Image (cartoon, rainbow, N blue to C red):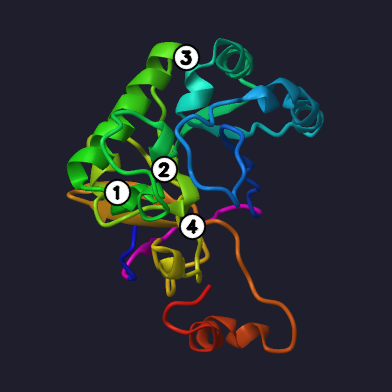
């Protein structure tokens, strides 16, 4: 996942558009993280976007977190669409609202990759099993909440049977906030090997515009600094 020696994904056709939605509880990003923020009323309005997707034959991926899975109304809506082949359900881990609740709730621990291997795996395994129980499907697509992949994340994904990761934001550094540093990783999809298993990385789109665009990957780290965004 973090290795700079990856195998590019070969495209044999036109560019492919993927629609991925972080499907999560409602909270104020400017406020402290709180385990009690579990409202998912927003899911009741998602049909408005789903109609647009259906009109253009788009099958979105809803990466869902624990508060969504535990809510009967929310998971019912998403499961119905999945049953009809109108969406794919993946996994989105917000550690502060995902059991087991063993860590202190703070910004550093909001990046699941900063947790111990054991706790990160316990949280993701619990969420993965819960999604399978509630939807009848075991998710194969993962996106870390806050893009918070860490040194153990790829190994955990492999052990839990995941096939695709969506956590990387190419040419972006979250280390100022305690998160991962993705500087130097490809902007194009690529395969990465984890203990003999190959997983697909679909990085979040990012690019540069303007007169210096072609030098963006070179200039950005220098201008932003080692700890900058």
Examine the rendered structure and indicate whether residue 107 appears above or below residue 33.
below
Q: Could you classify mark 4 by the number of other residues whose Cα lies within 10 Å: few (under 14), some (14-19), or many (20 or more)?
A: some
Give percent across and percent down for residue 147.
46, 53
Q: Tell me the tag on residue 153.
A: 1
Please state if 59 lies on the left or on the right of 142 as rendered: right
Give percent across and percent down for residue 151.
26, 57
Q: Tell me the tag on residue 144.
A: none
Q: Secondary structure at mark 3?
A: helix
Pick whichever of labels 3 and 2 is earlier in the sequence: 3
Q: Secondary structure at mark 2?
A: strand
Pick whichever of labels 2 and 1 is earlier in the sequence: 1
Q: Secondary structure at mark 4?
A: loop
Please state if 151 lies on the left or on the right of 112 as rendered: left
Q: Are marks 3 and 2 in contact (CB under 8 Å)?
A: no
| C-alpha separation, residue under disc 3 versus residue under disc 2 | 19 Å
Disc nearest the viewer among 3 and 2: 3
Residue 3 included in the magenta stretch of the image: no
Q: Tell me the tag on residue 189.
A: 4
Q: Residue at x 46, y 70 (%)?
A: 173
Q: Which residue matches tag 3?
A: 135
Q: Are marks 2 and 4 in contact (CB under 8 Å)?
A: no
| C-alpha separation, residue under disc 1 versus residue under disc 4 | 18 Å
Image: magenta residue range: 5-14
Q: Residue at x 22, y 37 (%)?
A: 159
162 vs 171, nearest the viewer: 171
Q: Could you classify mark 3 by the number of other residues whose Cα lies within 10 Å: few (under 14), some (14-19), or many (20 or more)?
A: some
Q: Tell me the tag on residue 164.
A: 2
Give percent across and percent down for residue 36.
49, 29
90 vs 190, nearest the viewer: 90
């Amino acid at each position: 996942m973090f290795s700079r020696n990856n195998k590019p994904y070969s495209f044999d056709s036109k560019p492919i558009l993927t629609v991925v939605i972080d499907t999560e509880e409602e909270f104020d990003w400017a406020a402290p993280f709180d385990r009690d923020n579990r409202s998912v009323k927003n899911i009741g309005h998602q049909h408005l976007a789903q109609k647009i997707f259906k009109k253009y034959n788009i099958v979105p991926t809803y990466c869902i977190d624990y508060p969504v899975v535990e809510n009967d109304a929310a998971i019912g809506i998403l499961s119905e669409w999945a049953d009809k082949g109108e969406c794919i359900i993946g996994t989105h881990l917000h550690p502060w609202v995902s059991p087991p609740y063993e860590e202190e709730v703070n910004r550093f621990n909001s990046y699941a990759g900063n947790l111990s291997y054991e706790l990160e795996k316990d949280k993701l395994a619990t969420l993965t099993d819960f999604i399978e129980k509630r939807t009848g499907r075991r998710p194969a697509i993962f996106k870390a909440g806050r893009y918070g992949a860490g040194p153990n994340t790829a190994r955990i994904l492999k052990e839990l049977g995941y096939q695709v990761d969506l956590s990387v934001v190419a040419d972006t550094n979250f280390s100022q906030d305690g998160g991962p540093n993705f500087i130097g990783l490809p902007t194009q999809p690529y395969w990465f090997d984890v203990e003999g298993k190959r997983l697909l990385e679909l990085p979040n789109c990012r690019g540069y515009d303007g007169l210096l665009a072609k030098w963006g990957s070179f200039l950005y780290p220098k201008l932003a600094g080692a700890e900058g965004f």
